[in-house]
Amino acid sequence: MSQSVSVIVTDDLDGSGNAETVSFGLDGVSYEIDLGKQNRARLERALAPFIEAARRAPRGGRHRSAGQAGGSSADRGAVRAWAKAAGLKVSERGRISADIMRQYDAAH
């Protein structure tokens, strides 16, 4: 016995068929909504002036990777050398504390 399953995506606003998922973000929060052609066009028209005036964010939005403690993109080797020369305790490997990263950024 075989079965056939159909998934029908409907517009989240008006229930019309043939909808597609649209993703967007605001204030660091990502959203998805299923919209048909008319409502998608409505959303695009409403957002157009804001998109035109905005700049693209780096991939990943506001999230920082583990390698960017404190938000600095400084060379970790240079930070360790500076911290040792400044008499600060810093490990040879692993994470550099956010406090040391802030001090390094302030000094440079």
Image: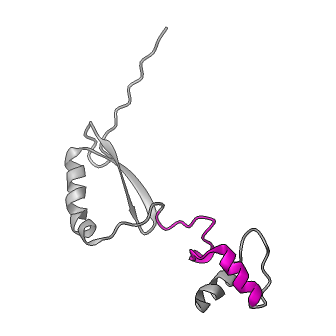
Of residues 60 and 29, the one drawn nearer to the viewer in this rendering: 60
Residue 107, above or below 97: below
- Relative image position of residue 67 (x, y in whole percent): 62, 67
Left or right of 74 in this view: 34: left
Q: Does residue 55 lie above or below 32 as drawn?
A: below
Magenta residues? 61-85
**Residue sitting at 25 percent across and 72 percent down?**
53
Query: Picture coordinates of residue 16 (x, y %)?
Result: 25, 40
Residue 6 place in picture, x, y as percent: 38, 25
Q: Residue at x 45, y 60 (%)?
A: 59
Residue at 26% in and 69% down: 50
Q: How many marks?
A: 0
Image position of 47 (left or right of 22) = left
From the top left corner, tell me how far across and down residue 33 is, in percent: 36, 50
Q: Residue furthest top?
A: 1
- Give the camera-side residue of 21 and 93: 93
Quadrant of the image for the C terminus? bottom right
**Is 56 situated left or right of 95 in this image?**
left
Q: Looking at the image, which residue is at 34% across and 32% down?
A: 8
* Residue 16 falls within the magenta-colored stretch: no
Between residue 90 and residue 14, name the one nearer to us: 90
Give the answer, above or below, for where 49 lies relative to 42. below
